[in-house]
Amino acid sequence: MKAAIFKGPSNIEISEIPIPKPGPDELLIKNIRIGICPTDLRYYKGLRKESTYDNPLFTTGIDTYGLSGHEVVGEVVELGDEVKGFEIGDIVTHETFTYCGNCRYCKDGLINLCENKKDIARGYSEYYKVPYKFVYKFSKSVDPKFGAFAEPLAVVIHAVKKVPQKNLAILGAGPMGMLMAIYSRHLGKNVVLIEIKKSRYEFARSLGINALPPDISVNPSTIKEILKDSIYGVISSIGGRSAVENAISIASDSAPIVIFGGTYPPDFIALDLNTVHYSEKIITGSTDHTREDMKESIELIEKKALPLDKLVTKEFNFQELKNAFDAALNGDEMKIQVTFV
């Protein structure tokens, strides 16, 4: 099979390697389609080196096959002897990570914070194997273009749930910020997108999303003045000191600020603790998703409840993966997906 191998920062190679053999409790999945995630790009650029699958570090060479790809939809082609509930031909997606089910977080349903969490993402390859208990089944009629949104939509659901207010401001109108806006609108929330890039502002407006013009979006005091008549929670869909500081600045008193985007390399902010104390601001993070989030995501996808196809603005064949990554880094596209058929 063909698989992406990491050779070093900004250097990947599509190589021919053996198809993995599933263990007794594993499924072998033939890839259909995958979406490119910002996390994938950080691995590609060499900014992240966390563990992946059975590697102690995301280093280089053949063991990195499939990279960190996780926005996947595929078809089951082989079953381990102990697999239950799946058949050859099932259309599936899976968790980005395994979880133990026994630690204090798993017992509370917070599998995303599992103390024994382990990355199993291998999606930039023609085939990959996954323990069946971490796999989710779609109806056979699902459109793979929609199916590849299962994981990113689940993490968006997880983040948006942290803002109980009806009003929500989202910093960043990139793929994840737009997905947040679309899902939040589905919930009936009043959404305002804050984006300094003109093309992304215009894209949001084309989908009927309320977005502030770039000249306003660069000024936190102006944003705060515009939003003053309602209590607004804020999600920063992008990482970095400036974005988080702006999110804290514009959030209403007694409202949450959700830090969704990762920051690489790590960065720090200075915070006046009295600002938090006297305003009752809530600063929290959001990472990955729970099983309930994923189930809701799959239900929405199967019902075609959200216009997810409008977010896919470019597709590449797997052989063009480097071009796909470079296009995603360029930032001119919204969601980029890679096809295997």
Image (spheres, rainbow, N blue to C red):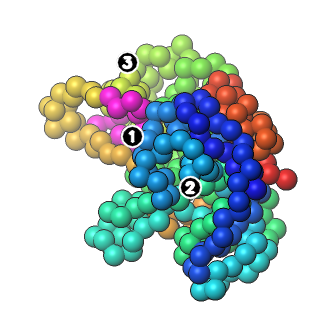
Of the image marks 3 and 2, the number of the one nearer the N terminus: 2
Q: CA distance from mark 3 to mark 1?
A: 20 Å
Of the image marks 3 and 1, the number of the one nearer the N terminus: 3
Disc 3 marks which residue? 221
| Residue 109 inside the magenta-drawn segment | no
Please name whichever residue, 143 or 279, is drawn nearer the observer in this view of the structure. 143
Disc 1 marks which residue? 259
Disc 2 marks which residue? 121
Q: In the visual, does 65 lie left or right of 340? A: left
Residue 78 in sight in this render: yes
Provide the major secondary structure of the magenta segment.
Answer: loop
Count of numbered tags: 3
The residue that appears at 44% across and 60% down in the rendered structure is 118
Q: Is residue 40 above or below residue 205?
A: below
Q: Position of residue 202 (x, y in %)?
A: 68, 24
- Name the kind of residue labelled 2 in the image: Ala
The part of the chain drawn in magenta is: 250-267
